[in-house]
């Protein structure tokens, strides 16, 4: 029967393997068909564009009595003339706006610009798309125009190629052909830029934060702590704050943790729940690993004043604060959480301003998926709250990532503008993500599930929040080209600019003032000295007691010996009492001999002979 069971199990395993192979084959076939469909769709669109180029004749549009002209007829494309007119009207704003590009409907339509109202950039946004589709260039275009409108910008340079924003771009025939085709009057330009670095790793003015300023929630996210460990870390921060122990760097935090599980420190947490040695051991090990990665340089003083990121240049343009982070590319959790700390600090320090004509600062959060990876519910709740409320402080946030699914739904719900570059559907998971993305867009004349897979580099599906707070029509957009260099600025130029920055004098040199580590070290040293003194006094008291004990023992021995001798004396005295009469008689005879005059004269003569002297009479 055992053999039958084995055979049945083998047969079931073989059937399962066959089923798995069939499913794999079907998935591969589905992928192949999806690729073929995408290729056919792209070819059809290209043919449609070529047909439109050949058939559409550009005619002079007669002017109306009021001087206006009718819009040009829509070229052959997925949208009809009414839908094109709706998009034209949907992106016509009264106030200042950021120019994103031109509508694509078979071909680019420079007379149908796609824009984002400047006042709505504090309603946040999302720039998404697969690698190599142009997200970084879109970020650069937005940053340049925000700066030109007097809005400060903060952006992280993950790949190291955004520093070119400080250097004028170089024109080319291909570039000018593209920009002319979308109605962009391109000219090279550079923008006021300040380069920062995390803790001085790499080029840039060092950005540091104190452990206290960072807080237990963000630090728990960086260290990957569970809920229990996060709660324990919060208790440590509470104790340090209550007892005036400044947590400035990792040494301070380690010192407080070690103290609170020592014999001296345990009593400090009575009534607060206490700390488990096992939990503290986990946190300390994570801190050691964290410091070994070089993270200890990010914490300390002087702590950056986030108001430095809200500056404008002398010509009124907003300063673009560029955080160079290639040196910490292998520390994604630290990078993303550090940016979240900057946002949280801005939220805490900036006053309420309500809705402004333009924001004070727009914050670009590149590689946003790193922020939300393995995040606790409490952390996500804080992110959502910060994003929701920081707009009233005059700050806009744009998340930049590969797919919208990287950003939690509660955060996506707060975003007013969306720039979606090409999405790829090479796997079933990709296809599922594509359908989920399409379902979040307003209804439009596009087959978005198809369109999002055939977008060219530098093209995107755009929808924004208009001046009335309503979503604009979905628009296939060919995006503008940056005016600054799309290549990194020369390293020598960056180093020179950083050295000349007035912020280097303020933040360039680390400060190590007295804090929790020093205070607890002194306290424990004093406690150790007091313990040593107490131990010495105790040892002396014990020695004195032992001495007194020995003295008492000696006295007792002496008394015992004396009593024994007395007893022996009395025994001998009693034993010899019978012969006392004869001894008395002998003594009387001796006294008679010595007392006679003849004897005394003999003695005197002997003494005179010995000492050479005689007694004078």
Image (cartoon, rainbow, N blue to C red):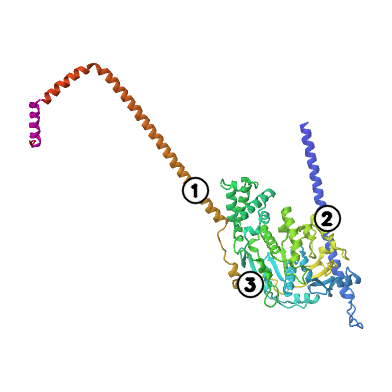
Q: Position of residue 262 (x, y in %)?
A: 57, 47
Q: Position of residue 180 (x, y in %)?
A: 79, 77
Q: Looking at the image, which residue is at 57% across and 66% down?
A: 509
Q: Which residue is mark 2?
A: 30
Q: Are marks 1 and 2 in contact (CB under 8 Å)?
A: no
Q: Looking at the image, which residue is at 8% across and 27% down?
A: 597
Looking at the rendered structure, the number of numbered marks drawn on it comes to: 3
Local secondary structure at mark 2: helix
359 w.r.t. 262: above or below = below
Quadrant assignment, res 420 = bottom right
Q: Nearer the viewer, residue 150 or 129?
A: 150
Q: Is residue 276 left or right of residue 16?
A: left
Q: Position of residue 377 (x, y in %)?
A: 74, 53
Dominant secondary-structure state across the stretch colored magenta: helix
Local secondary structure at mark 3: loop
Quadrant assignment, res 28 = bottom right
Region in magenta: 596-614
Few, some or many residues within 10 Å of mark 2 (<14, 14–19, 20+): some
Q: Which residue is mark 1?
A: 530
Q: Which residue is mark 3?
A: 490
Measure the C-alpha gap from mark 3 to mark 2: 47 Å
Measure the C-alpha gap from mark 1 to mark 2: 78 Å
Q: Earlier in the sequence, mark 1 or mark 2?
A: 2
Q: Earlier in the sequence, mark 3 or mark 1?
A: 3
313 w.r.t. 529: above or below = below
């Amino acid at each position: 029967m055992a053999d039958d069971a084995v055979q049945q199990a083998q047969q079931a395993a073989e059937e399962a393997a066959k089923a798995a192979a069939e499913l794999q084959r079907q998935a591969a076939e589905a992928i192949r068909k999806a690729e073929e469909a995408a290729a056919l769709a792209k070819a059809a669109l290209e043919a449609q564009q070529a047909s439109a180029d050949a058939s559409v004749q550009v005619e002079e549009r007669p002017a109306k009595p009021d001087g206006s002209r009718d819009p040009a007829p829509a070229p052959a494309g997925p949208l009809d003339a009414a839908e094109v007119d709706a998009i034209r009207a949907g992106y016509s704003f009264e106030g200042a706006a950021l120019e994103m590009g031109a509508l694509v409907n078979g071909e680019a339509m420079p007379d149908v610009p796609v824009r984002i109202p400047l006042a709505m950039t504090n309603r946040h946004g999302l720039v998404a798309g697969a690698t190599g589709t142009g997200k970084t260039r879109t970020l650069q275009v937005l940053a340049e125009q925000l700066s030109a409108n007097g809005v400060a910008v903060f952006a992280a340079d993950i790949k190291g190629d955004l520093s070119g924003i400080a250097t004028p771009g170089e024109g080319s025939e291909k570039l000018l052909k593209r920009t002319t085709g979308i109605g962009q009057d391109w000219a090279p330009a550079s923008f006021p830029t300040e380069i920062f670095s995390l803790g001085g790793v790499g080029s840039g003015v060092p950005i540091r934060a104190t452990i206290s300023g960072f807080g237990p929630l963000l630090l728990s996210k960086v260290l990957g702590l569970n809920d229990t460990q996060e709660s324990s870390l919060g208790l440590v921060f509470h104790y340090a704050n209550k007892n005036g122990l400044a947590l400035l760097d990792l040494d301070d935090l380690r010192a407080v943790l070690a103290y609170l599980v020592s014999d001296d420190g345990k009593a400090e947490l009575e009534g607060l729940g206490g700390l488990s040695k096992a939990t503290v051991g986990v946190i300390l090990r994570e801190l050691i690993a964290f410091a070994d990665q070089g993270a200890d340089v990010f914490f300390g003083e002087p702590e950056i004043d986030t108001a430095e990121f809200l500056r404008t240049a002398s010509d009124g343009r907003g300063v673009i604060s560029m955080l160079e982070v290639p040196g910490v590319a292998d520390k994604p959790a630290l990078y993303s959480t550090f940016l979240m700390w900057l946002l949280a600090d801005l939220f805490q320090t900036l006053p309420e301003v309500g809705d402004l004509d333009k924001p004070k600062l727009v914050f670009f959060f590149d590689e946003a998926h790193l922020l939300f990876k393995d995040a606790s519910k409490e952390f996500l709740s804080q992110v959502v709250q910060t994003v929701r409320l920081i707009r009233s402080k005059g700050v806009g946030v744009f998340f930049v990532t590969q797919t919208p699914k990287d950003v939690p739904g509660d955060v996506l719900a707060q975003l007013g503008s969306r720039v979606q570059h090409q999405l790829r559907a090479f796997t079933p998971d990709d296809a599922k993500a594509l359908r989920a993305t399409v379902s979040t867009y307003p209804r439009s004349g596009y087959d978005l599930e198809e369109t999002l897979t055939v977008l060219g580099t530098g093209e995107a599906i755009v929808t924004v929040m208009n001046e009335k707070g309503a979503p604009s029509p979905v628009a296939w957009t060919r995006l503008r080209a940056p005016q600054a260099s799309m290549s990194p600025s020369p390293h020598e130029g960056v180093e020179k600019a950083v050295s000349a920055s007035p912020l280097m004098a303020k933040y360039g040199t680390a400060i190590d003032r007295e804090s929790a580590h020093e205070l607890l070290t002194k306290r424990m040293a004093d406690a150790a000295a007091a313990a040593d003194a107490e131990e010495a006094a105790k040892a002396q008291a014990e020695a004195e007691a032992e001495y007194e004990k020995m003295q008492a023992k000696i006295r007792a021995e002496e008394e015992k010996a004396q009593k024994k001798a007395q007893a022996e004396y009395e025994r001998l005295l009693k034993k010899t009492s019978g012969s006392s009469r004869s001894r008395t008689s002998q003594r009387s005879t001796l006294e008679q001999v010595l007392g006679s005059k003849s004897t005394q004269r003999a003695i005197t003569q002997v003494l005179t002979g010995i000492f050479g002297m005689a007694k004078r009479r």
